[in-house]
Image: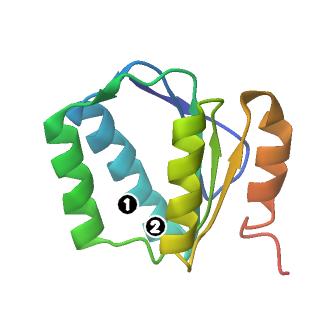
Amino acid sequence: MLTALDLGIANALAFRVSGSITESDVSEALEAARQLGKQYENITIYEEIESFEGFEFAAIIEKFKYLYDTGVSNISAAAILTDKRWLQKIIRVEDKIFRNMNIRCFSLDQREEAIQFLKHYAPENTD
């Protein structure tokens, strides 16, 4: 299940992950990403992973369709919060693969640090 979160960052797509991810969850999140992409040149992603039990196969297909149609070139940064070591390893690999995006992993108790990291990529910031 994906639960939308409001971080107070205009260009951030933020959600909490718990349990299994369904096709409907992914469709809603990707539609929100599309809408943000229409408003902002670059968007950021915030994922707080409390628990993770897997993806429905249809959810994976939905994500691949989005990547094919939209790509990730408009995603400037992602902050993933998790205490699961296996996910932390995957995130480090993704950071190396997606060079145009700054992907950082934070522990669940580092929420404020993750938000500050994404604020650097907010549209108001001219750095």
- Where is residue 68 drawn, in percent x and y? 22, 70
User: Looking at numbered disc 2 in the image, what kind of residue is underneath it?
Assistant: Gly
Q: Are dots 2 and 1 in contact, CB under 8 Å?
A: yes
- Where is residue 95 drawn, in percent x and y? 57, 66
User: Looking at numbered disc 1 in the image, what kind of residue is underneath it?
Assistant: Arg
Relative horizontal placement of residue 104, taking residue 26 as reference (left or right): right
Q: Residue at the location (60% across, 36% down)?
A: 85
Callout 1: 10 Å neighbours few (<14), some, many (20+)? some
Assign the N terminus to one quadrant of the image: top left
Q: Is residue 75 visible?
A: no
Query: What residue is shown with label 1?
Result: 34
Image quadrant assignment for residue 59:
top left
- Where is residue 99 drawn, in percent x and y? 55, 78
Q: Is residue 125 above or below residue 57?
A: below
Instruction: Compare residues 35 and 76 and report the one nearer the observer.
Output: 76
Numbered mark located on residue 37 in the image: 2
Relative horizontal placement of residue 123, taking residue 41 as reference (left or right): right
Query: From mark 2 to mark 1, how far is it between C-alphas?
Result: 5 Å
Task: Say which element carries label 2.
Answer: helix
Instruction: Compare residues 63 and 43 and report the one nearer the observer.
Output: 63
